[in-house]
Image (cartoon, rainbow, N blue to C red):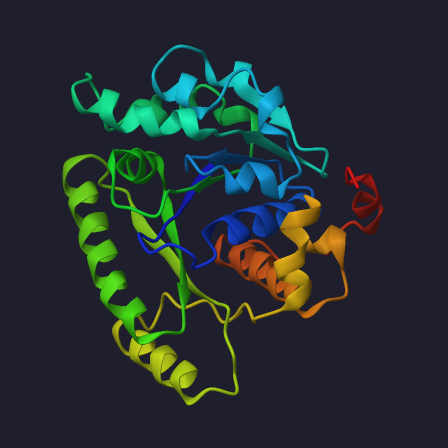
Amino acid sequence: MYIIAVANQKGGVGKSTTTVNLAASLGIRNKRVLCVDLDPQGNCTSGFGIKKKGISITTYDVIMGRAQIEEGIYDTGFANVSILCSTLALAAAEVELTSGENRAQRLRGQLLTVADEFDYVLIDCPPSLSLLTVNALAAADGVLIPMQCEFFALEGLSQLVESIRRVKKHYNPELEIEGIAFTMADSRLNLTGQVVNEVRSHFPDKLFKSVIPRNVKLSEAPSFGQPIIYYDRFSKGADAYERLAEELLRRHGEKRVKPDKKLLRKGNA
């Protein structure tokens, strides 16, 4: 099991979109994926079309030790992808964890109990450098950073890198940056190229070649509760996340894994 925290303290950069669509793209390549929705907003949960009112055990219950993780894992209905869902109740965990024991490694302990059941775990982090995010970083093998091609994104990146350094020092010496993925990119803008070049100069080996474009279909898919490869498999957004999944697998030493087209018909749409 390889655990990836999808993190960036800036909101609206595509963390949930990346978690949902990367998971689905890995799933149709016969990788067993668990998504952990660690954001109280629950966008990752909604992105799979899951109704929050019907959820009895959430990330909050697991983090606080009120339930075991296997009790809260749901089948998304999309091929090989499961999820630990989130609701607004998770916001309370931030306060409750402050005075709790082993507060930074609650999630890690729970994930280790299901290590044999999944190939990849993708943790959708909240848009803050909070105790919830620290739990994700303490549990993760790598950090995938979705990043918009904007000037202020560079400032946020340096803050996140510093947080990763601190977590690595105090909780998780094996933690590394998995890679930086540019999202909502518009190749027509000069600023896009400037930001890409600036990040490349500081992290030459960490940039994913796959860039996620601004795409109408990609924006529409969450409102239909479907990953983009199920909503519109032939859209630019679907192609971009397919390429990102392939690139991730190559980084982990796997040869090109073609998607199983039969699995695309198993979505909950």
Q: Position of residue 259 (x, y in %)?
A: 74, 53
Q: Residue furthest top?
A: 66
Residue 83 spot, x, y in % from top left:
57, 31
Q: Quadrant of residue 160?
A: bottom left
Nearer to the camera, 230 or 189? 189
Q: Quadrant of the C terminus?
A: top right
Q: Tell me if 102 is positioned left or right of 153 in this view.
A: left
Q: Residue at x 71, y 55 (%)?
A: 229
Total count of labels: 0
Judged left or right of residue 238, residue 250 is: left
Relative height, residue 178 to residue 188 (above, below): above
Residue drawn at the location 35% of the way across and 21% of the way down:
109
The answer to whether residue 119 shows anywhere in this view is: no
Residue 169 position within the rendered picture, expressed as x and y whole percent measured from the top left: 15, 42
Residue shown at 52% from the left, 53% from the top = 18
* Residue 121 horizontal side relative to residue 205, left or right: right
Camera-side residue: 47 or 258? 47
Does residue 161 appear left or right of residue 120 in this picture? Answer: left
Is there any visible trace of residue 62 in the rendered image?
Answer: yes
Residue 116 vertical placement versus 264 (above, below): above
48 above or below 165?
above
Q: Position of residue 225 (x, y in %)?
A: 68, 43
Q: Residue at the spot x=82%, y=51% of the render? A: 261
